[in-house]
Image: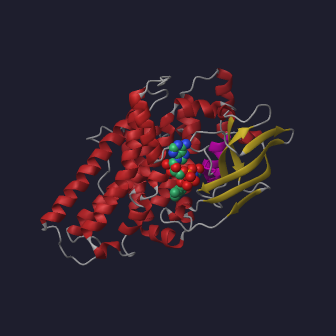
Amino acid sequence: MTDKPLFDPKAYRLTELEADLCSRVRIFGRSTLAPRAEKWDREAVFPAENYKDMAGNGLLGVCIPKASGGLGADYRAYCLAAAEMGRYCGATALTWNMHVSSTLWTGSLFDALDVSDDVRKDHEERRKIHHKRIIEDGAVYSQPFSEGGAAAAGAAPWSTQAQRTDKGWVINGKKIFASLSGHADYYGVLCTDITTDEPSRRNSLYLAVPANAEGVSVVGDWDPLGMRGTVSRTLLFDNVVVDPVNELMPQGLYYHMAMGWPHMFLTLAPTYMGICQAAYDFTVSYLRGEYPGTPPVKRRMYPTKQIAVSEMLIKLEQTKALWFQVISEACFKPNKEQLLRAYAAQYTVMENANDICRLAVRTCGGQSMLKSLPLERMYRDSRCGALMLPWTAELCMDRIGRGALYESGERDD
Ligand SMILES: Cc1cc2nc3c(=O)[nH]c(=O)nc-3n(C[C@H](O)[C@H](O)[C@H](O)COP(=O)(O)OP(=O)(O)OC[C@H]3O[C@@H](n4cnc5c(N)ncnc54)[C@H](O)[C@@H]3O)c2cc1C
């Protein structure tokens, strides 16, 4: 049995690649990810088995060009596929995002930047190395940028620092909430190049630090409310020497990308878009007395339940419509209206995921929140979305309010 697509290919006019990819992920999610999801959550362990499967079925290379052995997904195709995955295992979908971003940001997003032919050629050579590792060796990348200070919100330079030396880059610093810690083969670290200048966001460097390099350690425990399988522990870098071949982006260009391609930070949302759909689907199935493993008791005849489901569907459709528009128009140098809409979409997905789960638990009732069923996990996982920097729900609201009331450069004095 398969589920209906989250975004019907005909209704949403998906491309053939998008429709095929979503179908592939949906089948894999339902058959393989969903039955295992409880284990990662209960034990707060990384879904390593899923990653082995994803190395085998091509999903690790989803955003790598077909010519280099990948599936060739662009921004929208990836987002749609990731939303399908989020329906079945939040932790796998969220960590997949960390891995995929290392190829998406450096891939089709980078290609849209204004850079010289030489820079483009160098970058092309270097990213082939990362692609080869992923496609041939099943290497997994992660994306630790949070540090516990203002850097992850884009308000200060990274406190993790890189110094260029004869031996290569020497890295010192700390990253918190580093999903895939202890499991990724390369940590895609954002740090500040302090070789010649004072620390500045312009001097951000994006580097793949091999997990087994001397001086890299994983510390602290991981026992959170939700998204427990992400294993987001703390990473320490103590004079870690990294070969420049591991630069994920040419020096200085990460800053340009963060400024010009803001939708790059929206890729945490697909997981939660999937959770919105999953909580709604669960509710309909449960109230019809059809959810596998539960007694065939129908609860759909009560008007209050019908109203609650109606409220859930309205929220779900609002979320889908806004998010689909935003991932469809994502581009380099979006205009102000597009940018504010992207913040609004991120806010809506993250907040509505939790709200739809809340309604689902209340409507389905006590038996639905037992740990033998996935709803209570979705409820906990959904709470994490709005906390994720750089686009937390609060920061989205700050930026929307300011952006709506002020034009660039306007002041009140
Ligand atoms: C399950 C999970 C997995 C994660 N995985 C990763 C990962 O792989 N890589 C990674 O880099 N991070 C990851 N994170 C971290 C996440 O992106 C945030 O960095 C983290 O949740 C921030 O927590 P904090 O309490 O340190 O936030 P703080 O920096 O203390 O901020 C607290 C809140 O204050 C607000 N705030 C912060 N800065 C500003 C500002 N300048 N202006 C106004 N308001 C502000 C925000 O709303 C924020 O939520 C993960 C988080 C979770 C929950």
Task: Report the magenta residues as a range.
Answer: 129-147
Outermost residue, bottom direction? 295
In front: 257, or 18? Answer: 257
Residue for point 52% across, 62% down? 50
Residue for point 40% across, 75% down? 371
In front: 17, or 3? Answer: 3
In the image, residue 99 lies at what x, y percent? 57, 50
Is 138 in the magenta?
yes
Please, is residue 317 above or below residue 375 in the view?
Answer: above
The answer to whether residue 62 is seen in the rendering is: no
Residue for point 42% across, 39% down? 343
Residue 361 placement: quadrant: bottom left
Is 168 in the magenta?
no
In the image, residue 346 lies at what x, y percent? 41, 44
Please, is residue 320 above or below residue 95 in the view?
Answer: above
In the image, residue 16 lies at what x, y percent? 37, 39
Outermost residue, right direction? 166
